[in-house]
Structure formats: structure tokens, C-alpha cells
Amino acid sequence: MIYGKLPVEGAENFRSLDRYKTTDGRELKEGKLYRSGHLHDLTKADTEYFTLAGVHSIADFRGPSEVEDEPDKIPEGMSYLSYPIDIAGSELREKIISVIKGESDMDMIGYMLDINRQLALNYSETYGKWIHDIIDNPDSLPQVFHCTAGKDRAGFAAALLLRILEVPEETIMANYLESNDYNAEYIEKTIKKIKLLTFIKNDGEEIRPLLAVDSRYLQTAFDAIDSKWESFENYEHQGLKLSNEDIKTLKNRLLE
């Protein structure tokens, strides 16, 4: 369910993570968490909106090279928190360029499935630290958390958090898939740019799976969790290192 685009022009896929109901009838508090793409292109009006919304911290899931290339514009008085997940290096960029030029092939969907598998299996410590910081540092809220496009690393973060809070899985998936709506203009512009750069020799559709999200991506991550930890509850305790008391505190902090 889309509640309307928020007045932020310089960040793709920017939206609030609230109003979702849990299985026990509680609801996410409004204005505590926002998810987004990178914040390198924030306008003056955007930073003023962040201040007006009371944002206290920015949580960045991008890798070091991404941060160096496009550092966030941090509004005055807000803390910057880094949770680096570096899963797309220079080799991938070179491979994508090669595909765009028609010089090689690549299973883009298979690659995205593998990326989401990695998020679940290799970065539980990183996501656990992010969640623990929300629990241990209430002053970090309201918070904007993001990656580059706000759909994969940040998308998985949102899905994890909502699942811990016991939001129904169909609602979690709907929130995940909303990235296709919020990023629609960016996706089409990127594909159009590829057509122009290759003099229409490439229609750009080969890379659409990289630019969009698919229910199979998130489901692959959840399936990987079940495969390794046998249940999401075990993942909470063993992978994310959350105690029952931690989860209770998180729920009380984010739900009403």
C-alpha cells in the first residue's frame, strides 16, 4: 500500500516505514523510520524537510567505494551511521558494461537471487548491529536508512525489521515490491539512456532485473534463512543475536 510520495526530491525511493499493522493488532508508529536510496543529491529543501521531520540519524548500508563516490549530504545536527555491505564491486560494473555493449551475457535474475542469498547468509552480523543500535540508542530515532537505490540492502533491512515486529508476510512483500513503483521513473530513464548510448543497438531490458525488485529475490533470502537456521526465530536469536528482551524492547519502541 502506498501512502503517497513524501516531499523529498533528491533521493530515489524515499518513503516512511509506518502504519503497518502487526499480527497482534498493534501498528508501527508514524515518523520513526524512513527508507531511501542514497542521499548524495539532497536539495536544500530536502535537508529542511529532514529537520522538520525530526530525523536524528542516517544509516548507510553502502560499501566504502559507493560512499566515497557519492557521499551522503548529512543535514546539520544529524549523526551518520555506517553498516557497510559491499556486494557489488568494480568487476560487476565492468561486466554490466560488457553486457550493455553486447560483448557478453549475464544471468541478471540469477545474480540478483544470489545477492539476496548473500544478504541473508553473510550479513546477519551487520543487520544485527543495526537493529541493536536502534534498541540501544533510542535517540537515533527518527532515522533514515538507505543503500544506493533503496531496494536491495535497504529493502532487506526493512523486510527483516517488519518481520521481527510480526507484520504479516504478505504486507512485508508488498512493501518490498513498492520499490518498483517509487523507482519507476529512474528505471525507465536508465533504460532509455542505455538505448541512446548504444544507438538503440541495446534496448536496455537485459539490466531491468538489476534495477527492479522481484518477489523471488526476497523469498530467496527468507528461504536461505530457513535453510541455514531452520526458522526465522532461530535466525533472530542466532544470526541477529537478539534476545527475547531485545525483541520486546524493539516492539515497544516502534509499535503502538
Image (spheres, rainbow, N blue to C red):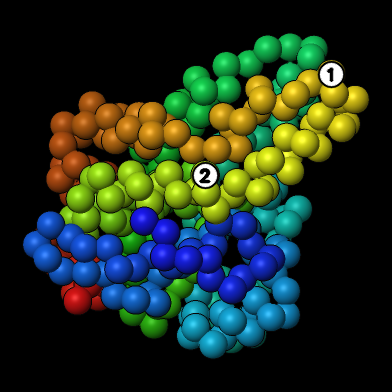
Residue at image position (59%, 73%) is 7
Q: Residue at x 45, y 49 (%)?
A: 178
Q: Nearer the viewer, residue 5 or 223?
A: 5
Q: At which x and y percent is residue 255?
A: 22, 72
Classify 216 as above or below 180: above
Which residue: 55% across, 53% down?
A: 182
Quadrant in which the N terminus is drawn: bottom left
Q: Is mark 2 on a helix, strand or loop?
A: helix
**Residue flagged by tag 2: what amino acid is it?**
Asn
Comparing 232 with 214, the one in front is 214
Mark number displayed over residue 201: 1
Residue 228 visible (yes or no): no
Q: Which residue lies furthest to the left in this view?
A: 24
Q: Mark 2 points at which residue?
A: 180
Q: How many labels does the image show?
A: 2
What percent of the width, then of the height, locates residue 195? Answer: 81, 29
Q: Which of 240 and 114 is in front in this view?
A: 114
- Badge 1 element: loop
Q: Please name the amino acid that badge 1 sits on.
A: Lys
User: In the rendered view, does 87 fall on the left or right side of 198?
Assistant: left
Quadrant, the C terminus: bottom left
> Is disc 2 surrounded by few (<14), some (14 to 19) or many (20+) residues within 10 Å?
some
Can you tell which quarter of the image residue 3 is in?
bottom left
